[in-house]
Image (cartoon, rainbow, N blue to C red):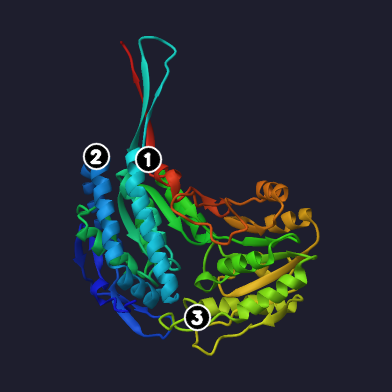
């Protein structure tokens, strides 16, 4: 696989299918080695306004284009991503840090949403409703909401973008995107490929910026924007909700998580170990759906812990371009400091580190794969996202105790459990207060299924036919005098 991404490096603002430079820039560095990748044009509030105007101008023609035409553009976009998948994966690894193999998987995963919604947009059906009188007809049709604003995080700089903008564009909406300032380059590369695919001017606009507050103020208050889709922290999501209230925008919010993994006595041990590692250590633990708390039943506790420790200790840490690397760096110094603080707090409250527990010799942003046991609900890591390669292990005895522990959080994005008893599986799945449940499986996200949480993890769905509905309005038409 090539590691050359220069052909996809476009460090500028993208508005109306044109590239714009600015006098002010911000730097994007490789978190694995600190090297400068690019100085990126730093969009201002005025640039965001221009992007909104471009999207609004493009909306009438794009929303009225036949679904088949929109689908053709999306299919071509998908094909071009496939053609440039190696370079895009290399760029992703460079700016985000995850291992190259994992980055390649994300590119494929991200592209799959474009392919899925290229197909799904041709099935945004209305319906005919039987009328109670003979001289009237009742019908509904689906229409695009309008201009959509999207704000995306740094941890999945391809997939978090395509999961939002592919259904929006497929539905007939136009988009203004503000990617994370830590990882804006993949978004801009996607925009380049979208233009090459024949995406009309103004349908997709990207405003990279170091000033999240200024850009956010435009996107949340502008009357032309009818919907905001955001992935990020719950605290930021709440602020965006408040800011959108003035113009009553529709919202989709994928916010924080605190995912439990429950390992029951009757679990397949090998499956539980592999599934938990797949969930916990993907992207060095920097995912909203990764295992934040591992709850293990007393009867299997020692066996699971021994097998899990052996497997975790074998994980290879290093720069993502090195062969065999499975754990890359954390995204920045603040991420490392947070992990250290959570471990320090847990240690003071009875936690015992049995593996790792300190920064890795690979570099200042690397952290050792870590396991801490004797965890309890008094620890900060039981309520906060760790967002690092740290497994916190809790002990429980009964099913009721496991459910209570798992649900003891304000969040409700994803949960996982391992059991071979079908009756227990149904019972537990129904009682867990989460939007996504993985049963005997640690990887749960696909374009065909809905992704989204409950409680303070937000609302709205991404992926599946529900994901398209997020960008459509239902219009009822009553025809009388027949």
Q: Assign the C terminus to one quadrant of the image.
A: top left
Question: In the image, what residue occupies the spot 64% across and 72% down?
Answer: 391
Q: Position of residue 167 (x, y in %)?
A: 36, 49
State left or right for residue 480 relative to residue 334. Answer: left
Of all residues, the one furthest to the bottom in this rendering is 361
Measure the alpha-carbon separation of dots 2 and 3.
Answer: 48 Å
Q: Assign the N terminus to one quadrant of the image.
A: bottom left
Camera-near label (2 vs 3) is: 2
Q: Quadrant of residue 188?
A: bottom left
Going from N to C along the chain, the mark reached first, 1 or 3, is 3
State left or right for residue 83 relative to residue 374. Answer: left
Instruction: Evaluate whether residue 225 shows in this view.
Output: no
Q: Which residue is mark 2?
A: 66
Q: Is residue 93 above or below residue 206?
A: below
Q: Which mark is residue 333?
A: 3
Q: Which residue is mark 1?
A: 472
Q: Are marks 2 and 3 in contact (CB under 8 Å)?
A: no
Camera-near label (1 vs 2) is: 2
For label 2, the SS is: loop
Camera-near label (1 vs 3) is: 1
Q: Is residue 100 above or below residue 144?
A: below
Q: Position of residue 309 (x, y in %)?
A: 67, 77
For label 3, the SS is: helix
For label 1, the SS is: strand
Measure the alpha-carbon separation of dots 1 and 3.
Answer: 41 Å
């Amino acid at each position: 696989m090539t590691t050359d991404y220069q052909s996809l490096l476009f460090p500028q603002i993208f508005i109306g299918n044109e590239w714009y430079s600015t006098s002010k820039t911000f730097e994007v560095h490789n978190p694995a080695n600190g090297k400068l990748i690019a100085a990126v044009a730093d969009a201002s509030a005025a640039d965001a306004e221009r992007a909104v105007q471009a999207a609004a101008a493009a909306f009438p023609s794009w929303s009225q284009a036949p679904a088949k035409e929109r689908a053709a553009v999306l299919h071509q976009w998908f094909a071009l991503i496939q053609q440039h998948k190696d370079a895009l994966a290399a760029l992703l690894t460079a700016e985000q840090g995850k291992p190259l193999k994992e980055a390649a998987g994300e590119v494929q995963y991200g592209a799959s949403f474009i392919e899925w919604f290229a197909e799904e947009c041709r099935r945004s059906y209305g319906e005919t409703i039987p009328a109670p009188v003979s001289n009237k007809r009742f019908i509904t049709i689906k229409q695009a909401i309008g201009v959509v604003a999207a704000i995306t995080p740094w941890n999945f700089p391809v997939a978090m973008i395509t999961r939002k903008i592919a259904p929006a564009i497929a539905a007939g909406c136009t988009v203004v995107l503000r990617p994370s300032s830590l990882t804006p380059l993949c978004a801009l590369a996607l925009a380049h490929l979208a233009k090459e695919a024949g995406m009309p001017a103004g349908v997709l606009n990207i405003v990279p910026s170091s000033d999240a507050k200024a850009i956010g103020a435009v996107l949340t208050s502008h009357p032309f924007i009818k919907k905001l889709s955001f992935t990020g922290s719950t605290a930021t999501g709440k602020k965006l909700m408040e800011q959108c209230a003035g113009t009553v925008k529709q919202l989709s919010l994928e916010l924080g998580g605190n995912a439990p993994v429950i390992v029951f006595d009757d679990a397949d041990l090998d499956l539980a170990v592999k599934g938990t590692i797949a969930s916990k250590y993907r992207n060095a633990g920097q995912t909203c759906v990764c295992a934040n708390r591992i709850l293990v039943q007393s009867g299997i506790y020692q066996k699971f812990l021994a097998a899990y420790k052996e497997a975790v200790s074998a994980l290879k840490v290093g720069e993502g371009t090195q062969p065999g690397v499975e754990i890359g760096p954390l995204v920045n110094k603040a991420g490392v400091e947070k992990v250290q603080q959570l471990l320090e707090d847990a240690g003071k409250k009875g936690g015992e580190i049995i593996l790792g527990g300190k920064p890795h010799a690979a570099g200042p942003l690397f952290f050792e794969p870590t396991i801490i046991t004797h965890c309890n609900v008094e620890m900060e890591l039981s309520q906060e996202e760790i967002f690092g390669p740290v497994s916190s292990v809790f002990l429980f005895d009964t099913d009721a105790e496991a459910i209570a522990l798992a649900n003891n959080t304000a969040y409700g994005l994803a949960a996982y459990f391992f059991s071979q008893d079908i009756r227990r599986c149904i019972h537990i799945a129904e009682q867990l207060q989460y939007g996504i449940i993985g049963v005997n499986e640690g990887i749960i996200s696909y374009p065909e299924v809905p992704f989204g949480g409950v409680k303070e993890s937000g609302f709205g769905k991404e992926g599946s036919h529900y994901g398209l509905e997020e960008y459509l309005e239902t219009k009822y038409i009553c025809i009388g005098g027949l």
